[in-house]
Image (cartoon, rainbow, N blue to C red):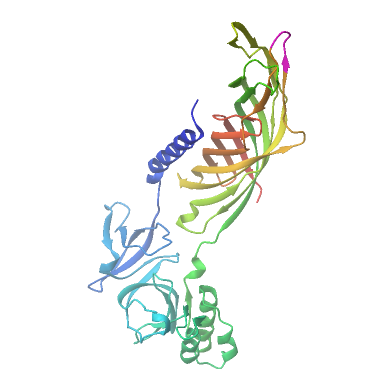
């Protein structure tokens, strides 16, 4: 019988195989432009991967019928994908004086992401350091970090970014108290720089407003489980002075193929990057496992003092209800405007609802009566799945359970087919 480690390994292999095959799914080309090293602006279609980091190259084509070309971002002065937050521009960042705690800032020519554009712009580098962009000046770094003071050995913070804001955003609508309340983060910095631009009658173009936000979905789900119940039992001879021989035997019993209906809900969070292709989810569902009886399944002979004996009996497993709670990661792939497919991997547990499961052994006449115990030690599950979504409303999913331990039994290798309807 395959070990749990072997089942986990097989499940992960299958998931990774289908995941790698599906990576060729569609990524959209969108209108945009780039400025090359000769300061020539090129209108084109740029492949939008919705990067969560800074791209080292972009793919583009001059129109729909042209071949796809690549260019390294190190060769560009800027590039922008229209109607998205992806606007990057090259700046020459000056070195800064020595800072407490040995802090250093990357200097020289580098691509910065433009978060806000106006008389004063807000920029950010690959290390999540923010800058003020002022015309005819090198970007002004907004420094904020923790360090250990060599004198006191205490953790202190260099938040000199507020001093830079105070010196460079002078206007009657901005007070020192406003500056003091600014936190070092995109939201607060965009707000204070926008306030300054409005005060000096300069229009601000906020590229962060086009940034995707996390999406929360609730779905009602229902379907069917297809499974075979496995009972892993261990029989041992009771500690008895009259026992002539010690006996220990482990067996696995199986029911026939069974099915049961499941119902519940799914809560999903689509993460705000890579076109919301990644999601976290949890799917509590109510299940009911059927009981079964195996008649005279036990047969064991042994010899003691030239005498053969054995045991024989019926095993009765009662059915019970449980709530399955998988928590997992899902990867979506776009087929077209109305259709998505997904692969998912989840791990979770099962909780008994109502009466606990039990195993009863009815010993036959003239058989050796032994103590029995189940060897299933936990209630956990590991599953891989694939699904289809239509019009962001209706879903169909198929799941394979590499592991599904249910207190006194397991249904490893079971399948489920689940339908879903989005209500939120």
Q: Give the residue drawn at x 60%, y 36%.
A: 418
Relative image position of residue 287 (x, y in whole percent): 68, 34
In the image, 190 versus 249, the foreground residue is 249
Where is residue 327? Give x, y as percent.
Answer: 58, 46
Q: Is residue 364 magenta?
A: yes
Residue in view at x 46 percent, y 79 percent: 147
Residue 322 in sight: yes
The relative height of residue 168 versus residue 243 in the rendered view (above or below) is below
Direction from residue 135 to residue 288 in the image, left or right: right
Could you tell me residue 308's position as x and y percent? 61, 7
Rendering coords of residue 297 (x, y %): 64, 14
Overall secondary structure of the magenta stretch? loop
Q: Is residue 287 left or right of residue 11?
A: right
| Viewer-side residue, 253 vs 119 | 253
| Residue displayed at 59% across by 42% down | 394
| Res. 175 visible in picture | no
Rendered position, 147 above or below 165: above
**In-front residue for pair 284/278:** 284
Q: Which residues are magenta?
A: 362-367
Answer with the quarter of the image where residue 408 lies. Answer: top right
Residue 121 left/right relative to 194: left
């Amino acid at each position: 019988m395959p070990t749990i480690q072997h089942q986990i390994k097989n499940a992960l292999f299958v998931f990774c195989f289908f995941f790698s095959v599906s990576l060729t799914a569609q990524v959209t080309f969108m209108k945009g432009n780039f400025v090359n090293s000769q300061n020539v602006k090129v209108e084109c279609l740029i492949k939008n991967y919705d990067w969560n980091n800074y791209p080292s190259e972009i793919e583009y084509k001059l129109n729909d019928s042209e071949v796809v070309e690549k260019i390294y971002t190190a060769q560009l002065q800027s590039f922008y994908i229209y109607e998205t937050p992806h606007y990057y521009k090259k700046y020459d960042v000056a070195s800064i004086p020595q800072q407490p705690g040995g802090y250093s800032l990357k200097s020289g020519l580098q691509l910065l992401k433009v978060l806000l554009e106006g008389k004063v712009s807000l920029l950010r580098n690959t290390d999540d350091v923010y800058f003020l962009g002022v015309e005819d000046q090198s970007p002004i770094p907004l420094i904020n970090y923790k360090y250990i003071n060599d004198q006191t050995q205490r953790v202190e913070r260099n938040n000199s970014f507020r001093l830079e804001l105070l010196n460079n955003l002078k206007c009657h609508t901005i007070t020192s108290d406003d500056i003091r309340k600014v936190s070092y983060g995109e939201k607060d910095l965009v707000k204070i720089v926008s306030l300054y631009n409005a005060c000096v009658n300069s229009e601000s173009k906020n590229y962060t407003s086009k940034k995707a936000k996390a999406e929360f979905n609730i779905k009602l789900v229902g379907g069917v489980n297809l499974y075979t119940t496995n009972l892993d039992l261990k029989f041992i001879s009771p500690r008895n002075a009259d026992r002539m021989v010690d006996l220990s035997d482990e067996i696995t019993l199986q029911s026939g193929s069974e099915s049961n209906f499941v119902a519940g809900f799914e809560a999903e969070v689509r993460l705000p990057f890579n076109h919301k292709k990644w999601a976290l989810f949890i799917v509590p569902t109510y299940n009911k496992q059927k009981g079964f009886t195996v008649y005279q399944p036990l047969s064991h002979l042994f010899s003691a003092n030239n005498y053969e004996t054995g045991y024989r009996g019926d095993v009765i497993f009662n059915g019970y209800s449980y709530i399955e709670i998988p928590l997992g990661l899902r990867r979506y792939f776009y087929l077209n405007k109305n259709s998505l497919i997904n692969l998912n991997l989840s791990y979770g547990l099962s909780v008994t609802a109502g009466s606990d499961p039990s195993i009863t052994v009815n010993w036959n006449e003239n058989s050796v009566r032994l103590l029995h115990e189940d060897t299933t030690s936990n209630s956990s599950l590991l599953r891989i799945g694939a699904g289809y979504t239509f019009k962001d409303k209706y879903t169909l999913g198929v799941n394979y359970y590499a592991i599904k331990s249910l207190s006194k039994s397991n249904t490893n290798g079971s399948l489920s087919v689940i339908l879903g309807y989005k209500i939120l």
